[in-house]
Image (cartoon, rainbow, N blue to C red):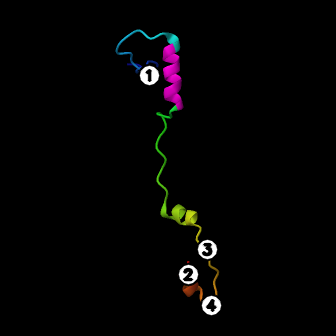
Amino acid sequence: MSESEAAPVLRVVRGEPSPEQLAVLTAVLLRSGGGQEPPEPESAWQLDARKGTRVLHPGPGVWQRSLRR
């Protein structure tokens, strides 16, 4: 198979759908996002940022305050 010829993405197994029916099916499949890759998992840094942890500034008693919620 040459580069200009791509393998078919859809194949009709039974029946003879009209061009309109194939267009609707193609639109629905594209809209569902079947061709997208799954999102990458979040890192531990991103998860901590979403928790809304406080920013601690240097100074006396910082270690004790860091343990409080």
In this view, the mark in front (1 or 4):
4
Left or right of 38, for residue 55: right
Q: Amino acid at mark 2?
A: Ser
Q: Tag 4, which secondary structure? A: loop
Q: Tag 2, which secondary structure? A: helix
Q: Amino acid at mark 4?
A: Pro
Q: Position of residue 24 (x, y in %)?
A: 52, 20
Would you name the residue on which mark 2 appears? 66
Would you name the residue on which mark 3 appears? 54
Would you name the residue on which mark 1 appears? 3
Q: Residue at x 52, y 29 (%)?
A: 30
Would you name the residue on which mark 4 appears? 60
In this view, the mark in front (4 or 3):
3
Q: Residue at x 50, y 35 (%)?
A: 33
The quadrant of the image that shows the N terminus is top left
Q: Amino acid at mark 1?
A: Glu
In this view, the mark in front (4 or 2):
2
Magenta part of the protein: which range?
21-31
Measured Cα–Cα span from mark 1 to mark 4: 68 Å
Residue at the far bottom in the pictured view: 60
Q: Tag 3, which secondary structure? A: loop
In depth, the one of 55 and 52 nearer the eye is 52
- Identify whether 58 is placed above or below 42: below
User: Is label 4 in contact with label 3 (beta carbons under 8 Å)?
Assistant: no
**Earlier residue among tags 1 and 2:** 1
Q: Residue at x 62, y 74 (%)?
A: 55
**Earlier residue among tags 4 and 2:** 4
User: Is label 1 in contact with label 4 (beta carbons under 8 Å)?
Assistant: no
